[in-house]
Amino acid sequence: TGNVSIDGRLVEINDCRNLLELIRLAGIELPTFCYHSELSIYGACRMCMVEVDGRGLTAACSTPPENGMVVHTNTARTRRLRRMIIELLLANHERECTSCERSGNCRLQQLAHQLGVTRVRFGGRDRRLPVDGSSPALVKNPNKCILCGDCVRMCKEIQGLGIWDFAFRGAKTQVTTAFDKPLAEVSCVNCGQCAAVCPTGALTVKPDVDRVWEAIYDPDKVVVVQVAPAVRVAIGEEFGLHPGEKATGQMVAALRRIGFDRVFDTLFTADMTTIEESLELLGRLDNGGRLPLFTSCCPAWVKYAEQFHAGLLENLSTCRSPQQMFGSLIKKHYARETGLESGKMVCVSVMPCTAKKFEAIRPEFVTAESPDVDIVLTTVELAKMIKEAGIVFNELEPQTFDNPLGMGSGAAVIYGASGGVMESVVRFVSFHLDGAGQGRVDFYPARGMQGIKEAELAIGGQTLKLAVVNGLGNAEKLIRRLEAGEIFYHAVEIMACPGGCLGGGGQPVPNDTTVRRERMKGIYSLDRAEQLHRPQDNVFVTRALERWFGGPANRNTHRDLHTHYYP
Ligand code: HC0
Ligand code: SF4
């Protein structure tokens, strides 16, 4: 408690952990590269240096506020220092800004502009390091790295993986993988969280926009697109809307303008997933199958389980993710029904996620002909296409998805938030076990940003123990306790990204906790606005299951909508 004087104004400390938080609270946007509230404090970039009376220059991020401190954020010395830091970073940076993936959205570029750096007085770098494009999800360009260590701490502290670390010394220091191996050859699960915190173009999403344009320009191709739940509450951020502000209608209109032949909704197969996965859970409960049942729609989590917990693979739901169910439906059943040749169809998906790029090329989902899902774009990539086409997003008249694969319930929308898959399953299962009309719709214990959420569901004479986890570091904690026999659950939802898909590595930046909270609110308000709230009420889905498979959870759905992850 107490006060700190910031540029002559008294500010109450309250529960601010460091001077930087306090200064920002006081309305001064002190620049930083390496500070993220959810990560540990590294204090390497020195951009947040301030002058404190009696102490001189101090890094605000690593100084706890004390009663009576007198802080100056904008003095001749701090200004000189900040500009010097930027100049030094720029001197050592590959400055091909105009053709950089992050151009217009790069923190280094922004700060150089904001601090009025118009020339660089120091010599350039002497060597160019190779770019690593081996991963299906990310590209690493070490020549653009400013050594802030954000990716290092993100992967280690939140995801518990530690793929990145500092290597070599002095001027040769680099951030790289163990033994400097290509990213595709290490245990990276493609979650993209490291790229989401990278302030520059050193870690970027593997671009697939050109492949989509090519398909659209090809008169022989029918290009079908599906859009994931979490995209609609975030894409607006690229066009000046608030995080969480729904932009479904404009997004659909933009997709049609771009030239997609069919504009469908992943919500459709999210409902289908809930039905198949709920019946799988009920089946395991009935005949003593492997428990807990883990969700398997997050491809980063699936890869994590394959690499580190092969013994748990039998516990993973055999349901394909909604993205992959969609691909299978399109290429097989929709194609047949509409008389389109599946070889002429290009199935594109728009996801908040970078790991979905990896999932789409998994051999399980690729037949001789082609992958079920041909190309995966992130939310940001779709926004790029919209901008490239010159479409004025905010002036678009909202449109609706094509049918029949454009219809989803509120239970499908919430897939985009951590806890959503579990809540959908609860909506289905409680209806099943408790009889018609009795099913509960809102299941609050599954909601929120917390890393591990636990809940009990007393239903049909039994109590189901459930857990919802986001962040792989948290998943590891839970699995350790499970394996030690300290806890037991019937079902566990795991999503790799903090907050769930809405915090995916393909979402617009900033992609921090504050923004994620807003997107989460947006997701639940979309659910409230939907007419249907339970997957089983989506007649488009139940009819499709009937027509194409002769009902849910049978040999036919297992052939086309399920898979198996082998140890
Ligand atoms: Fe998700 Fe999905 S909910 S993983 O988070 O299950 O990416 O949004 O599309 O497939 O539906 C991501 C989001 C999806 C899938 C769905 C699931
Ligand atoms: Fe780590 Fe995820 Fe980045 Fe891979 S994509 S290096 S797992 S943070």
Image (tube, grey):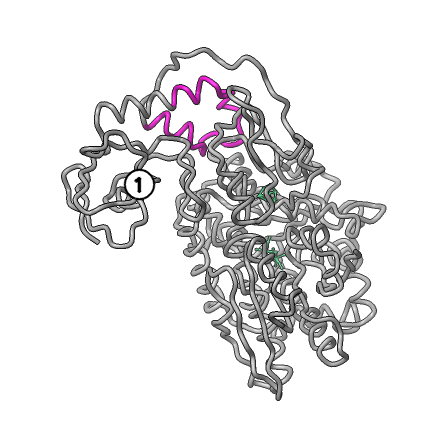
Would you call the spot at circle 1 few (<14 residues within 10 Å), some (14-19), or many (20 or more)? Answer: few
Quadrant containing the C terminus in the rendered view: bottom right
Q: Where on the picture, by quarter, is residue 557?
A: bottom right
Magenta span includes 112: yes
In this rendering, would 222 be left or right of 368?
left
Quadrant containing the N terminus in the rendered view: bottom left
Magenta span includes 41: no
Reply above or below: 291 against 206. below
Who's the residue at 53% across and 67% down the image? Answer: 410
Find disc 1 in the rendering and name its residue: 63
Who's the residue at 62% across and 72% down the image? Answer: 489
Q: Where on the picture, by quarter, is residue 558?
A: bottom right
| Amino acid type, residue under disc 1 in the picture | Thr
Under tag 1, what secondary structure?
loop
In the image, the segment drawn in magenta is 86-114
Q: Where on the picture, by quarter, is residue 296?
A: bottom right
Foreground: 441 or 10? 10
Who's the residue at 19% across and 40% down the image? Answer: 6
Reply above or below: 100 against 545. above
Ligand 2 quarter of the rendering: top right
Foreground: 482 or 315? 482
Q: Position of residue 99 (x, y in %)?
A: 53, 24
* Residue, far right: 368
Who's the residue at 53% across and 42% down the image? Answer: 380
